[in-house]
Amino acid sequence: MEQEFLQAEKEAENKSDYEKAGFYQKQSESLRHERVLDLLSRYCVIPKYGFPVDVVELQVYREGRPDNRYDLSRDLRVAISEYAPDSEVIVDGKKYTSKYVTLPKIKGFTRHYFCTCPNCRKVNVHLSEGTDRLCKYCGEPIGSLNWEYYIEPAEGFKTGITKESTRMKPKRSYAGEVFYLGGGQKDEAAAVFGEMITAESSSNDRLLVMNKSRFYICPRCGYAEIIKGNIPGLRMEQEHKNFRQYNCENETLQPVRLGHSFETDVARLIIPLLRSQEREDYAKALSFLYAFLEGFSMAAGIERKDIDGVLELNLEKGSYDVLIYDNVPGGAGHVKRLIDEEIMRKALESARSKVLQNCCDENTSCYNCLRNYYNQSKHSLLRRGYAREIIDLLAPVRPAASRSDTGI
Ligand SMILES: [Zn+2]
Ligand SMILES: [Zn+2]
Ligand SMILES: [Zn+2]
C-alpha cells in the first residue's frame, strides 16, 4: 500500500503537481500512524479477537461540553450507520443527534478511493486516484470512472444540537452496505455437495462496510451533514459551529463516504443454479442467502448476529456466489464449519423449515422468516417462496415412497 503512495507522490512530482504530491505524502504518514495500532494487534500486543479494537464512541456533548455519564460505544461496522452524522439516538429518554466526526489527533483522515467496476461489479479500493488503472478483479479499464473516497471514522463521533421535535422515534440510517474485497488466505479443504454447491473457505479475508449516504464534512472540526439526493457537488460553502459551539473558521465542506474495512473468515458457496441473468434473479439469490443464514445459524447453534452474508457476481458461471462471513472482530471460524457435509445438509434442512412456516404470504417475507433489523434495505426484495424453490432444487426432499421402505 505504501508503495502505491510513493508512486503516486513521484508521479505528481514529475508532473510538477506539488499540491498533490504533498497530499499523498500526508496520506502515507497518516496511514503509517494507523498501521502502528494494526501491527500491535496483529502481533498480539493487543489481541484482536475478543478485544474490541474497532469499537468507537458517540461522545455526548451538552452546550459544547462533553457529558461523560454515558458510554455509547459500538463496533465501527455498526457505528458507521447508527452513529453517522444526523442519526439520532435515545439515551435516558432524551434524544441526541450525531453531528461531528471526530478527527484523528495527529493527521487528517486517510482517503480510501473506490469505484465499482461496471464489468464485474466489484469494488476496487486504492489509496490514490489512478487514471490508467485496470480493475484488479477482471482487468477492465476503470481509470476514467468517477472515483469517490471514503474515510474510516475510527475516532468516533460527537453529538451536536438536537432540533426539538415531538417525534420520539429516532431517525436512523440503514445498516451499511457490505462489499467483498478479498485478499485472504484460502484454506486447502473444499467440499462439493451433490454437485450443486461447491464450498471453500478463507481466513483474513477483507470486507468493506459503507454507509449508503454521502456526507459533507468540515476538515477542520468534523462537522458533517448528510447529503440529500444522489449527486454531491465538489464542495459546499456553509457557516457552522464546531463541537464546542463556536463558529468554525472553515466554511468549505467536502463530500465523503463513511466506511470501514475489516478482516474475517469467509465461506464461499459457488452455486451455479443461482443464475444472474434476469432482474428477478437477484431477488431470488438474496432470498436464498437470508434463508440460508437462518438455517446455518439454527443448525450449527451460532447466534444469527454473529454471521452474515453477501452476494458476489460470478462472471465465469453467470451466477451469484453466496459469501457467508463471521460477523465478529477478526473472525471466529464459524463459517469454516460449512465445509462439513453434515452441517451443510442440516443448514439447508433448517433453512427449509424456516421458509415452510405459514408466517406470511409466499410472495413476501416477514420477521419470522427472512427479515431482520439489519437487512431492512432489502426487505422489499425478499420472498419466502423464492427461497423455498431454490432450497428444494439444491436439496430435493426425499420422495415419500423411500420412507415406506423403512417399514413405516
Ligand atoms: Zn472488474
Ligand atoms: Zn468546521
Ligand atoms: Zn414470513
Image (cartoon, helix red, strand yellow):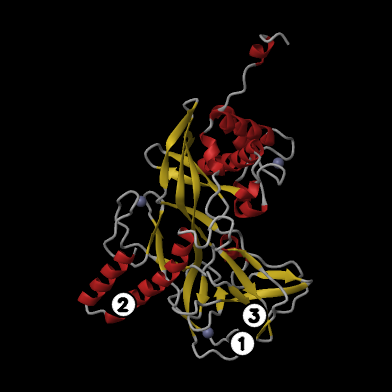
Q: Who comes first in sequence, dot 1 or dot 3?
A: 3
369 sits to left or right of 12: right
Mark closer to the chain start, 2 or 1: 2
Q: Quadrant of the C terminus?
A: top right
Expressed as whole percent of the image width and height from the top left, the position of residue 47 reads: 53, 58
Query: Would you say the residues marked 2 and 3 are in contact, meaning their CB atoms lie under 8 Å apart?
Result: no
| Label disc, if present, on residue 244 of the rendered structure | 1
Q: Does the CB distance between marks 2 and 1 fall below 8 Å?
A: no
User: Pointer 2: residues within 10 angstroms few (<14), some, or many (20+)?
Assistant: some
Amino acid type, callout 3: Gly
Residue 278 visible, this angle: no
**Rounded to the nearest whole Å, what is the CA distance between mark 2 and mark 1?**
32 Å
- The residue at which mark 3 appears reads as 160
Mark 1 vs mark 3, foreground winner is 1
In the image, what residue occupies the spot 58% across and 53% down? 328
Q: Which mark is residue 20?
A: 2
The residues tagged by marks 1 and 3 sit, at their Cα atoms, a distance apart of 9 Å
With respect to residue 293, does 179 lie above or below? below
Label 3: which secondary element: loop
Q: Secondary structure at mark 2?
A: helix
Callout 2 amino acid: Lys
Pinpoint residue 191: horizontal percent, then vertical percent: 47, 31
